[in-house]
Image: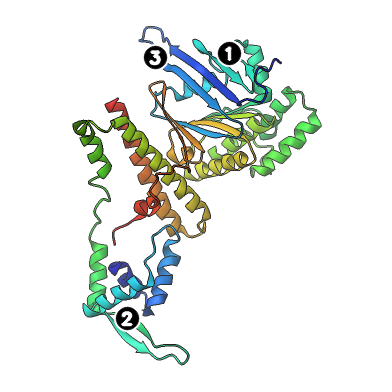
Amino acid sequence: MNRDEPSGPILRAAGLVKTHRPEGAAPVHAVRGVDLTVARGEFVAVTGPSGAGKSTLLHLLGGLDRPDSGALWVDGRQVDTYSEARWAELRRHHIGIVFQFFNLVSNLSVADNVELPALLAGRSPRQARTDRTELLDELGLTGKENCTPGELSGGEQQRVALARALVNSPSLLLADEPAGSLDSKGTREVLRLLARFHRRGQTILLVTHDARIASAADRVISFFDGRVRDDAHLGSAPDRPAAGVSDVLKLKG
Amino acid sequence: MRLPLLALLVGGPAHGYELKQALENLLGAAYPQPNVGQIYVTLNRLEKAALIEGEDVEQSDRPNKRIYRITDAGRETVDAWFEETTAEPRVRDEFFMKLALAPHTGTADQITLINKQRRQYLNTMRDLSKLAASEDRDNRVAQLLIEGAMLHLQADLDWLERCQEELE
């Protein structure tokens, strides 16, 4: 594959535009000119109200949808001209995606859901099994290998989806509202796992409406009406009053 | 501080330092803890108001300690406290005043204000997540306190989003 910027950022988007044109309805300007760079090892959250275009942006970045205009580089490759087949190949090796509703294959076992992408990427069955076992263990799913997704809780299904997304050690993990259909326990669990993989160097970009999820990231992008409106690195603001936590926690007594 | 100390004393007599420790164990690190001096001052006032009564207990190797027990009037005060509902935490908001007044001064941009405030809330949310992770998982009261603060912040962030949608 041709690598234009081998040591550059994991992800670079320039002037991405996407307008949905539903039949018989007014066009929706979902993404209106987005420039974005994600460095290796960053954990970025994109937040904004529903309908702001966050999911469309994520779909463009993962090649699930095509921009009307603009350019996109993934790990140094310019990919905006890629065919469907090349995108599928790129995702298999370099991009893991987690969705709000898990999107597991419902009639395959947990083990097969995780091993399938490894086999498709050319891993030997033995290696795929080893990798799957290791990941499921890491994600606290040992003993669930032979279950089908329908037999698991939402939180467990999302962990299986996370295992599937990570089994090929992608350079980029994309997640679309990964806790959007989980209860607060499931949300905490997914958060803890994302933070753990991030600490090991996994680059993550997720879109979320949940500020708890967003605040786990190092960098939060506020997305409104198809545009980036703020791009903030957390935990390093110099002008920040230190009393934040105790103010919020101050109760009447 | 008055009423929580009184409520603790309903459970049995205690001295000042025991009360401080009981509060810390109950609420965890998230709650801004009073120093022992504040606790003694408050106990003094409660005693003057006859809501508690103190008794000095001699200790052989240390100065005397004063043990407090709750009086009938103190119990009634605690009962009344539980009886009445508690006011909502937010009815006025300094940030909202800034946002409302920004166009009048012409010196501050509303969207810039919103973005700055959002960064502040997100950083606080991050601090709370860290606190929740470091706090004892089995201390349910402390965990619920942090979760409550996070839900308030989430609401504040949702409201900032509404402001931005309306004002842009």
Q: Is residue A33 above or below residue B97?
A: above
Image side of residue B5 versus residue A59, left or right: left
Disc 1 or 3, which lies upstream in sequence?
Answer: 3
Image side of residue B158 versus residue A213, left or right: left
Say yes or no: labels 1 and 3 on the same chain. yes
**Residue B6: image location, x then y, percent:** 30, 72
Q: Which residue is mark 2?
A: B69
Three-letter residue code for mark 3:
Val
- Which chain does the numbered disc 1 sit on? A
Q: Which residue is mark 3?
A: A28
Quadrant (top left/top right/bottom left/bottom right) for the C terminus of chain A: bottom left
- Which chain does the numbered disc 3 sit on? A
Callout 1 secondary element: loop
- Label 1 and label 3: CA atoms lie apart by 21 Å
Residue closest to the far left: B104
Three-letter residue code for mark 1:
Asp
Q: How is the image coloured?
A: rainbow
Q: Is residue B96 above or below residue B90?
A: above
Which residue is at 43% across, 39% downward? A211
Q: Are marks 1 and 3 in contact (CB under 8 Å)?
A: no
Camera-near label (2 vs 1) is 1
Q: Which residue is mark 1?
A: A80
> Residue A198 appears in which quarter of the rendering?
top right
Image side of residue A213 versus residue A131, left or right: left
**Residue B92: image location, x then y, percent:** 23, 46
Three-letter residue code for mark 2:
Arg
